[in-house]
Image (tube, grey):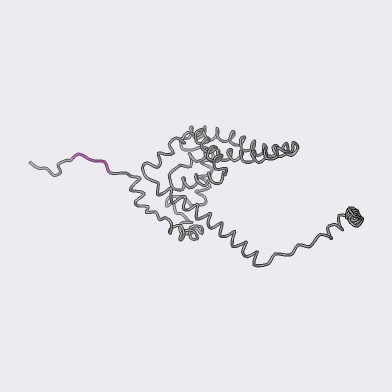
Amino acid sequence: PDEAQVVSAVGAAEQSPAEAEKAKPEERPRAWWMVVVGIIGVLACLHIFLVGLQLLGDAFKCLGGRGAGGMFDAVSNPIAGLMVGILATVLVQSSSTSTSIVVGLVGAHQMSVKTGIPIIMGANIGTSVTNTLVSMGQSGDRITLQRSFAGATVHDMFNILTVLCLLPLEVVVGAIQGEGGALYWITKVIADAAMGSGSKKEDPLKGKSPTKIITSPLAKAVISNNKHVIKALALGAPAAMPATWVNATA
């Protein structure tokens, strides 16, 4: 290198941090239209997400009927439900996706809350695989790998220990009480307090859900459920009865 480059390099090295900070080019503020476009984009993505959740619930309602509930008989076992949650989350690499599916099933009355609790626990364990895989990506640097794997292990142990503590409690209390465990009753109390309960069982939020008002026009354009048909399918065909004489007189 020539003498001028050497002098400039030495001068840059002798600069203080404050001088180096001042020497950096100032960041220009973003234009107002970019901020507006960003906000609109976020709201549009949120709207698409909410519409997708409603379509998911509506699709499960359309699948409802006499045979659809039988698909989930196997997960009535808490351990089986836990394994299903783990495998589903590992396959899709997203606990939000598997949890949203369970919420849609419960909302469509295709799965009970008691059955969904172990699956949600399994989803929390399955999401631990993702951060472990990310930490393995730092295998090129031994020190970085050690730190990243330690951080991933903290998240893994928290989820695993939480399930080890709460799942046996849920199973034991559910076996004693007969309807559900501790988490089931906690969620039931919260839901009853939010939605209203009592002799009339009035729902203060019925017809006032802002998400349904926003998402219903687009969701109904894709799929529209007839609750009377779904109820008839759930009841099944009427059983044949032997013919009898009515008002028979000799």
Residue displayed at 37% across by 54% down:
226
Q: Give percent across and percent down for residue 111.
A: 45, 42
Q: State left or right for residue 158 relative to residue 53.
A: right
Q: State left or right for residue 245 relative to residue 16.
A: left
Q: Is residue 13 above or below residue 156?
A: below
* Magenta segment: 238-242
Residue 47 covered by magenta stretch? no
Q: Give percent across and percent down for residue 96.
A: 56, 46
Q: How many marks?
A: 0
Q: Give percent across and percent down for residue 101.
A: 50, 46
Image quarter (top left, top right, bottom left or bottom right) of the C terminus:
top left
Residue lying furthest bottom: 32
Secondary structure mostly seen in magenta is loop
Residue lying furthest front: 2
Q: State left or right for residue 36 relative to residue 57.
A: right
Observer-nearest residue: 232 or 179? 232
Q: Give percent across and percent down for residue 94.
A: 57, 44
Which quadrant of the structure image shows residue 223?
bottom left
Residue displayed at 59% across by 59% down:
42
Observer-nearest residue: 62 or 191? 62
Q: Is residue 114 above or below residue 41?
A: above
